[in-house]
Amino acid sequence: MDLSHPIMAASSTTWRDFRQLGVAHQSSLSAPPHSLVQLRVEYGAWDCSQCQFGNTCYCNSVLQALYFCRPFREKVLAYKVQPRKKESLLTCLSDLFNSIATQKKKVGVIPPKKFISRLRKENELFDNYMQQDAHEFLNYLLNTIADLLQEEKKQEKQNGKLQNGSVRSEDHQKPRPTWVHEIFQGTLTNETRCLNCETVSSKDEDFLDLSVDVEQNTSITHCLRGFSNTETLCSECKYYCEQCRSKQEAQKRMRVKKLPMILALHLKRFKYMDQLHRYTKLSYRVVFPLELRLFNTSGDATNPDRLYDLVAVVVHCGSGPNRGHYITIVKSHGFWLLFDDDIVEKIDAQAIEEFYGLTSDISKNSESGYILFYQSRD
């Protein structure tokens, strides 16, 4: 399967668009316009808007971003769906990704009907026609796939041991990491220092994505530094020190101990406003670079100098969490594409700046980066 050629959605394919992309074979440029759409579904253009599924762009945008996270896409495409295997989100996702990768039709989009139906059967949160949160969906999807893979490993072990007639105590051990963990999982270390005895205690915590607070006119690097700022525990929030055996003032900070292969960063753009009794959107301008290096790593971090490249961005368009729309920006073979459900457009790298957010605090519709996907170079 050659992934070197883009595929555009039929509703947005024009002769001008295709020539702008500059990716057709020379022989294709002399062909009539109706043949141009043969290069379409390799870019993962699918649409639920024509499938009577309601507002599902939150799902479309995340799936399109994940399709362009190469390690994840390759694992999903390689997933073997057994003939009698029970239908799950993973089997439906594998079918969807394989439909995209092997598509031979010259016209039309790929509606993920089966995937959406399975999603709504498994989680009532998504079983409606309302707009949902893209980050909640991403979190649910990754954790569900990881749980399914761990359950499969467990069943395979049990079946093998039943055949061998032996059962070991290791059956009750902690589940082994899956390829979801290998790709997305990083580790945070929470360091707390007692200000009385100077004893430092640390506790590790795994993550599949990082949620960071946003501020006006900042950068994602600044947000990550804020994530790791030192916090003083005092007054009613004093820390119980095991060494002192009493509550003491302390300082704590969060550092990244293990950097993931793909770093998914969630910008916390929705804040509950007491006076309004609802969530409102923080459209603050937050710059996210094409290359990223983390500086909030711990002293014992593995690969602390790991360099990341931006590969996909889920963008929220609108003024609030339950209204508006999601689109996706992805990088493929050196150029950038914008996905809006079934519409695909090429954009310049410089145009990504339009999705940083607004410099004004005035509440209005904005197109703001919401979930960033960075892939490590090593």
Image (cartoon, helix red, strand yellow):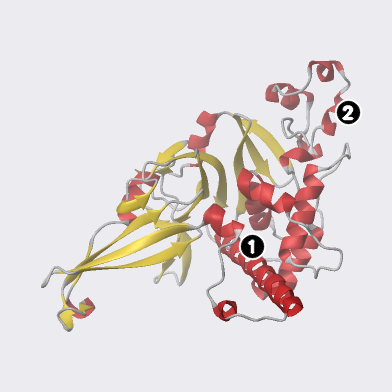
Task: Give the side of residue 167 with respect to residue 320, left or right.
Answer: right
Tag 2, which secondary structure? helix
**Percent x, y for residue 55?**
70, 59
Going by the numbered disc 1, the residue's amino acid type is: Gln
What residue is drawn where x is 79% and y is 49%? 98
Residue 274, placed above or below residue 247: above
Whether residue 14 can be seen here: yes
Q: Residues within 10 Å of mark 2 (few under 14, many from 20)?
A: few
Choose between 118 and 107: the one closer to the eye: 118
> Residue under circle 1?
131
Residue 305, placed above or below residue 264: above
What residue is drawn where x is 18% and y is 81%? 247
What residue is drawn where x is 73% and y is 70%? 120
Q: Residues within 10 Å of mark 1 (few under 14, many from 20)?
A: some
Whether residue 52 can be seen here: no
Number of dots carrying numbers: 2
Task: Give the side of residue 204 with respect to residue 178, left or right.
Answer: left
**Percent x, y for residue 364?**
49, 51
**Which of the 4 image quadrants contains residue 128?**
bottom right
Residue 34 circle label: 2
The quarter of the picture where the N terminus appears is top right
**Nearest to N terminus: mark 2 or mark 1:** 2
Choose between 180 and 330: the one closer to the eye: 180
Camera-nearest label, 2 or 1: 2
Mark 2 vs mark 1, CA separation in Å: 35 Å
Tag 1, which secondary structure? loop
